[in-house]
Image (cartoon, coloured by chain):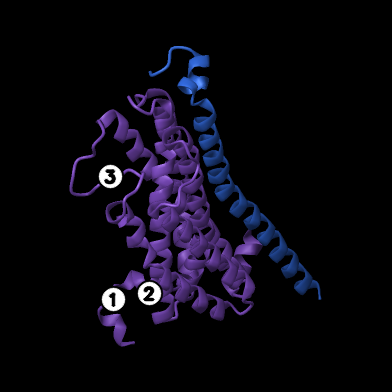
Chain colours: A purple, B blue
Amino acid sequence: MADKKWLPRWFFQLASPRWCYQFTGRLLPWFLLSTLVLLTVGTVWALLFAPADYQQGNSFRIIYLHVPSAILAQSAYMLMAVAGAIGLIWKMKVADMVLKSAAPIGASMAVLALATGAIWGKPTWGSWWVWDARLTSMLILLFLYLGVMALNSAIENESTAAQASAVLALVGVVNIPIIKYSVDWWNTLHQPATFKLTEKPAMPPEMWLPLLVMVIGFYCFFAVSLMQRLRNEIIWRERRAGWVRELLIKQ
Amino acid sequence: MSFNTVSEFLAMGGHGLYVWLSYGLGAVLIAANLIVPKLSRNRLLAEQKRRLRREETA
């Protein structure tokens, strides 16, 4: 293959389901440990030690779930679209499996972001829901996830399902910048971004440090859940392969 | 610490319902996303082991 000259070796190793299974097996315990530590520390910090907001009081503590789940819902979508593109271009089976595995996690994070937003909105804005650009584009993100999941369960043939969901995931990427800039482009009740790469956060460190811990914890959680699902998918699709047979006998 | 007593902590300054509802849902969703794949792994491995044994005896 001519591609081999400019793409790094690990890219092709990733294409091997067996290599992927073994590699994620080594990573999994460390990510699980990090997830448990970070989420426990972050939650205790958020609920007990972070100061209450001077306007919103203690309902402000919902931010420690709302922002990480919203960030993760969008990152998971980006990963899903990248995996979809790789699957379409290089016909890489592992990429198809990553796309399929990321969808349910992303969907539940979109649900969490929307639900915590609604619960937070009630005491803060006086309403559970407003048809505002940020909220609507986030709801569309949830529907895109549900669409990918529906395609995967409705289409029997694995490679057809992968192609269809990759196309949907790629078309839906247009929604990501809309979510991001919705608070700048339209008048909205929703507050602007909490974290920006270019500026210091508007909150004091005792408020945003626990948030940072939660965001990193959520990413680790995503990695764990994704690897678990991916490994199941690999075993299922490679169940006739010799190495899976050996693995089952050894168990 | 932001709270002096346990009841103050549970009340969350009158926003207890909203805060605990959010954290409860968050805990359920995160736990589900870790436990469900683990259970399906156990089921998958058991099924495949059964299939192997069937094929060996046949």
- Residue with the mark numbered 2: A12
The answer to whether residue A41 shows anywhere in this view is no
Which residue does the image show at 26% across and 34% down from the upper left?
A203
Residue situated furthest top in the rendering? B4
Q: Residue A7, which numbered label?
A: 1
Of the 4 image quadrants, the one containing the C terminus of chain A is bottom right
Q: Chain of mark 2?
A: A
Q: Residues within 10 Å of mark 1 (few under 14, many from 20)?
A: few
Which numbered mark, 2 or 3, is in the foreground of this view?
3
Residue type highlighted by circle 3: Phe
Q: Residues within 10 Å of mark 2 (few under 14, many from 20)?
A: few
Q: Residue A195, which numbered label?
A: 3
Looking at marks 1 and 2 on the same chain, the residue that comes earlier in the sequence is marked by 1
Looking at marks 3 and 1 on the same chain, the residue that comes earlier in the sequence is marked by 1
Which residue does the image show at 48% across and 56% down from the upper left?
A139
- Left or right position of A46 against A118: left
Judging depth in this view, the residue of A67 and A182 nearest the camera is: A182
SS of the residue at dot 2?
Answer: helix
Looking at marks 2 and 3 on the same chain, the residue that comes earlier in the sequence is marked by 2
Judging depth in this view, the residue of A45 and A16 nearest the camera is: A45
Query: Label 2 near label 1: C-beta < 8 Å?
Result: yes
SS of the residue at dot 1?
Answer: loop
- Left or right position of B24 against A131: right
Residue situated furthest bottom in the rendering? A2
- Residue B19, x across and y down, in percent: 49, 31
- Left or right position of B47 against A40: right
The Cα atoms of the two marked residues, 1 and 2, are separated by 8 Å
SS of the residue at dot 3?
Answer: loop
Q: Are marks 2 and 3 on the same chain?
A: yes
Which residue does the image show at 48% across and 67% down from the upper left?
A99
The Cα atoms of the two marked residues, 2 and 3, are separated by 35 Å
Residue type highlighted by circle 1: Leu
